Image: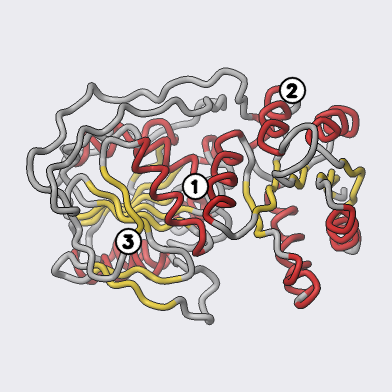
Amino acid sequence: MAVKVLVVDDSGFFRRRVSEILSADPNIQVVGTATNGKEAIDQALALKPDVITMDYEMPMMDGITAVRHIMQRCPTPVLMFSSLTHEGARVTLDALDAGAVDFLPKNFEDISRNPEKVKQLLCEKILSISRSNRRVSTYAAPAPVAAPAPTPAPSSVGSYGSSAPARPAPAPIPARSHAASPSSPAPKRKAYKLVAIGTSTGGPVALQRVLTQLPANFPAPIVLIQHMPAAFTKAFAERLDKLCRISVKEAEDGDILRPGMALLAPGGKQMMIDGRGAVKILPGDERLNYKPCVDITFGSAAKSYGDKVLAVVLTGMGADGREGARLLKQGGSSIWAQDEASCVIYGMPMAIVKAELADAVYGLDDIGRHLIEACI
């Protein structure tokens, strides 16, 4: 059965072009269009589409407000279109917090210059997120994330050359409701030298949920690999830094891994770690599908830290992270995977589980707590 799509955009050209691209795929059916957020809500209720594509800036009601209403009244996977700017990144991250599943850059030049590539990417996204868990989620009643009692910030000098400021308490995140799934036992404590977390679709909200649970004195350095465009990672790191008690920044070449700090791999590039705990940022290789690539960072961590890495693979499409996790496992490191019930897209974690690389499988809301148990 074809995936039913509602296309929402105030630009007549963009609505027509997206509708044409999607309608050319025999597995996709455009069932309606809307020109603003209010129309989008009405059409979502009437047409019950499998996926909605959503612009942000529209008259009468913007896309983020529309997403919030849709998630409350008829939860549906939403694909946002975003501009590749810092402000576009901020807005897109707000939309993901509101319940959108994924996003694509809104670039008119790409549509006219490289239509086949755009068509393939858009259709793949639509088909993938149509199978997401978004329909079984609820965003009607935001609830705070469970977190340990506030911990004083370390008195040592931070990476910016001044005493570390007090970190905020975790911010509320929209609650997910899903059936309970079997979970692995609580982890045993180990002196890990690095926690490495890889994720893709659904990752921004998942990372926020995990990292806001960690105390300021979390003893292990953290590296984050999130599939995301170059224009987005700085804004995402800034957002996490404001919400978390640990420090978060976009990684730069030469950064040194430090306890209580998470370094986010910059979009469009690759991040590696050497044995001295220094970060290397390399140009994105066009031969690689993902920039940044989880496999690349995991592989370098395996070479540099042997059995002292705790790697976590969260929600995402595809299998990025599996081969890097295999190298880590061969070196004696530990691998955790997010469980299917709490994933937006059970792709990357499923690849870990099917390859029998997972030492533990945990629900999203348990991962932060278990990281504390394993490392403190």
The number of numbered badges drawn on the structure is 3
Mark 2 and mark 1 in contact (Cβ < 8 Å)? no
Q: Which residue is mark 2?
A: 73
For residue 251, the mark is 3
Q: Amino acid at mark 3?
A: Ala
Q: Amino acid at mark 2?
A: Arg
Question: Which residue shows up at 74% across the image and 54% down it?
Answer: 127
- Badge 1 or badge 2: first in the primary sequence: 2
Would you call the spot at circle 3 few (<14 residues within 10 Å), some (14-19), or many (20 or more)? many
Question: Which residue shows up at 42% across the image and 78% down it?
Answer: 283
Would you call the spot at circle 2 few (<14 residues within 10 Å), some (14-19), or many (20 or more)? some
- Badge 2 or badge 3: first in the primary sequence: 2
Image coordinates for residue 219, horizontal then vertical, percent: 15, 44
Say left or right for 138 vs 194. right
Say left or right for 375 vs 86. left
Under circle 1, the secondary element is helix
Image coordinates for residue 261, horizontal then vertical, percent: 24, 48
Question: Which residue shows up at 73% across the image and 71% down it?
Answer: 110
Dividing the picture into quarters, in which one does residue 63 lie?
top right
- Badge 3 or badge 1: first in the primary sequence: 1
Q: In the displayed structure, would residue 279 be above or below residue 159?
A: below
Q: In the displayed structure, would residue 189 be above or below residue 290?
A: above
- Whole-Å distance between the Cαs marked 3 and 1? 17 Å
Mark 1 and mark 3 in contact (Cβ < 8 Å)? no
Say left or right for 23 vs 306. right
Would you call the spot at circle 1 few (<14 residues within 10 Å), some (14-19), or many (20 or more)? many
> Closer to the observer: label 3 or label 1?
3
Image coordinates for residue 205, horizontal then vertical, percent: 49, 40
Q: Which residue is mark 1?
A: 203
